[in-house]
Amino acid sequence: MEALRQVALISGASRGIGAATAREMARRGYHVVVNYRRDAAAAHRVVGEIETAGGSAEALQADVCDAGQSAEMVRRIHADHGHIDVLICNANTVNPPFEPLLSVPWEAFIGKVTGELAGAFFLTRYVLPAMQRRRAGRIVYISSTAADFVGSVAAHSIAKAALNTYSRHVAAQAAQHGIVVNTVAFGTVRTDATAGVLNGDLRKLTEERSVLGRVMDAEDAARSVAAVADDGFGVTVGQVIRVDSGFGVLDHQLHVMTKHFQRGDEGTSA
Ligand SMILES: NC(=O)c1ccc[n+]([C@@H]2O[C@H](COP(=O)([O-])OP(=O)(O)OC[C@H]3O[C@@H](n4cnc5c(N)ncnc54)[C@H](OP(=O)(O)O)[C@@H]3O)[C@@H](O)[C@H]2O)c1
């Protein structure tokens, strides 16, 4: 029984943003539950890395889209540790169909939307009551700036927009019990999920428009998630916090500069 460490449950922590967040939360002193669906070896590698670095972690298999498996994982953590202090709903449950809204098949569309929501819904349902009884806890949902896009990632965009709204409902209910709920929405992050699409134009665009001058990596993303999860980001509650390495800011600057130079052009030609 871990009596001293706070416990963080991170869904989909065997790879990518989840794995990096697991390492970062362990570095901050949490006992981390590295949840995974299929890849036990990868999850145990993450646990091994954390333990080698002096941290504490365990790997637990559960498909977080499955109510029974989610309930059993949460029951087991409560039995072993007594509490869950931080829940990070990160699992990339369904890869997005890259098709425009009018041609995406209904099954692919609804599969993405329900998969996205299921990954948050069941864990929240089983973790929240105990947090409410203790009047303590933080929940972070991992979303995407794609929620604001229109175009070929329609199903993904709509699924993440639904997650954002879902998280605000949870935040409103949980806040009455002293629990802090927020969402972190990432721009493009270099992980397995983006390996197939992060080529040519998208990579170049992201590099050019990013204040980092490069695509964010999982460690960049993890530091942001941990900052929100660790102390709840002060009094920030029910917010969707964009972490996009300045993509939006630079767009704004670009817009302002374009206007400025357009005025300059007009002045020159007058
Ligand atoms: N990468 C980006 O550019 C980006 C941008 C914005 C938002 N995001 C969001 O960030 C989160 C993480 O993305 P990522 O790029 O790190 O994904 P990733 O590299 O594809 O990793 C996905 C992780 O989720 C786990 N997983 C998938 N389905 C699961 C399920 N049903 N139950 C439990 N675990 C499951 C996988 O475990 P197994 O390998 O064992 O199946 C793996 O650990 C996602 O919510 C994604 O939408 C990513």
Image (cartoon, helix red, strand yellow):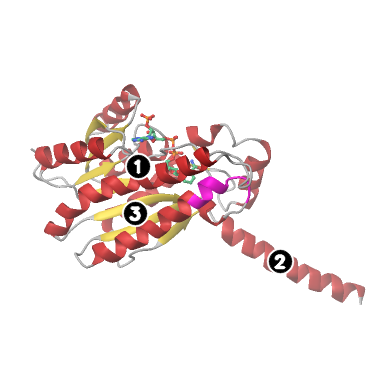
Dot 3, crowdedness within 10 Å: few (<14), some or many (≥20)? Answer: some
User: At x 41% / y 44%, what residue is drawn?
Assistant: 114
Which residue has dot 2 on it? Answer: 257
For this rendering, which residue is in front, 262 or 178?
A: 178
Pinpoint residue 203: horizontal percent, then vertical percent.
62, 41
Between tags 2 and 1, which lies in front?
1
Residue 147 is situated, as x and y percent measured from the top left of the image, at: 51, 54
- What residue type is disc 1 on? Thr
Q: Which range is magenta?
A: 151-158
Q: Is residue 80 left or right of residue 191?
A: left
Q: Which mark is drawn over residue 21?
A: 1
Q: CA distance from mark 3 to mark 1?
A: 10 Å
Q: Residues within 10 Å of mark 2 (few under 14, many from 20)?
A: few
Quarter where residue 30 is shown: top left
Q: Secondary structure at mark 2?
A: helix
What distance separates the C-alpha of mark 3 from that of mark 2?
32 Å
Residue 157 appearing in the image: yes
| Between discs 3 and 2, the one toward the N terminus | 3
Q: Secondary structure at mark 1?
A: helix
